[in-house]
Amino acid sequence: MQAAYYERTGAARAVLQVGELPEPAPGPGEVRVRLHCSGVNPSDVKSRAGLRSSVLPFERIVPHSDGAGVIDAVGGGVSPARIGERVWIWNGAWGRANGTAAEWITLPARQAVALPEDTPLEAGACFGIPALTGLHAVQSHGGVQGKTVLVAGGAGAVGHYAVQFARLLGARQVFATVSSAQKAALARSAGADAAIDYRAEDVATRVRDLAGGAGIHRIIEVDIAANGALDAELLRPGGELVVYGSGAREFSLPFFPLIARNLNLHFFIVYNLGEPDRAAAEQTLTRLLTEQRLTHQIAERLPLAQIAAAHELVESGRAIGNVVLTIA
Ligand SMILES: NC(=O)c1ccc[n+]([C@@H]2O[C@H](COP(=O)([O-])OP(=O)(O)OC[C@H]3O[C@@H](n4cnc5c(N)ncnc54)[C@H](OP(=O)(O)O)[C@@H]3O)[C@@H](O)[C@H]2O)c1
């Protein structure tokens, strides 16, 4: 089969190769998926670049955790009725050598989730990481019903979903920070009541004006290192800071505002969601997809052969939305 892979970490063009690898067969409890799309996330790019570790956990890695396609074979113990099912995939390359940047993937049946009929396969390649991260950030810890929510980076791949989920799951007000007029328009079209340009405006003053001085119930944070101190100022007593990203390996937070207002800090990585949280997120996502309530922001579609360009685009931070590889 055609697949993209790397055997050492480094710059995209230096290490990513596209070539023939053996076609996999599903083992017991597994399904085989003929992939149509593979989603490229910052996490995939960081792993390939060696930012987490320069030592590869496997000799050869087919990258990317997210993808979508059609089940075309099942292993022992999996119902043959699943053959022909359109699915989206989670954790394809998390702790595994063979991700979704290939014509086929085999993986535990639980990691291939049925895609509702009207949901395009390319959208399905954005769910495992961006949609589930945005959804868990909104839905966990009691959810956002009746709350005021601020989504930092509300036009990002995760942020765009987080804004939609906050709106759809009952937030009273949803605000987003962005860095351009184009991103502001995107956040507003996703359901944000207001978008604040964090590079050009005084975020604290704007948020206080918008939230009526009462403060924010929940902040969904893409960059705790840059924004943590501001978040601690903006949250109301008992508020929640839900963190899924950081622009730096280390950061500091001011102690007094956090403790004086009984603020709650929650960190999570979507790869390691516990089973109840994952099941809850999948259930809500499936419902909202079936009701056709979500929009999917695909920034760029590139063929598998152009995987290095796709990685560079994600690395550049210029993509507004998800970068998806199409697999012939
Ligand atoms: N914990 C998890 O499970 C999890 C899951 C998914 C992603 N992540 C991490 O989360 C980050 C974002 O992922 P993504 O796929 O959404 O990337 P993305 O599509 O590039 O979105 C990031 C967004 O954040 C904005 N941004 C960057 N720095 C910001 C800041 N200091 N304040 C406000 N907005 C800021 C960016 O826009 P501007 O630069 O124009 O402001 C961009 O719109 C990455 O570091 C990724 O590794 C973590």
Image: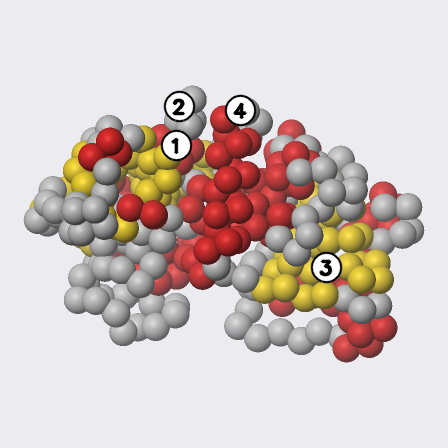
| Mark 1 and mark 4: Cα distance apart in space | 12 Å
Residue 234 percent location from the top left of the image: 81, 58
Identified by mark 3, the residue type is: Glu
- Of the numbered discs 1 and 4, the one sitting upstream in the chain is 1
Q: Which residue is mark 3?
A: 240
| Residue nearest the observer in this picture, 267 or 313 | 267
Res 324 seen here = no
Identified by mark 2, the residue type is: Glu
- Of the numbered discs 2 and 3, the one sitting upstream in the chain is 2
- Of the numbered discs 3 and 1, the one sitting upstream in the chain is 1
Residue 323 percent location from the top left of the image: 40, 41
| Mark 3 and mark 4: Cα distance apart in space | 29 Å
Mark 3 Cα shell of 10 Å, populated few (<14), some (14-19), many (≥20): many
Identified by mark 1, the residue type is: Leu
| Residue nearest the observer in this picture, 111 or 320 | 111
Q: Secondary structure at mark 3?
A: strand
Q: Which residue is mark 1?
A: 115
Above/below status of 127 relative to 244: above
| Mark 2 and mark 1: Cα distance apart in space | 6 Å
Labels in figure, total = 4
**Residue at horizontal 77%, vertical 77%?**
255
Q: Secondary structure at mark 2?
A: loop
Using the rendered view, name the quadrant where residue 184 is placed.
Answer: top right
Which colouring convention does the figure follow? secondary structure
Q: Nearer the viewer, mark 3 or mark 1?
A: 1
Checking the image for residue 292, the label placed there is 4
Checking the image for residue 268, the label placed there is none
**Residue at horizontal 24%, vertical 31%?**
81
Q: Which residue is mark 2?
A: 117
| Mark 4 and mark 2: Cα distance apart in space | 10 Å
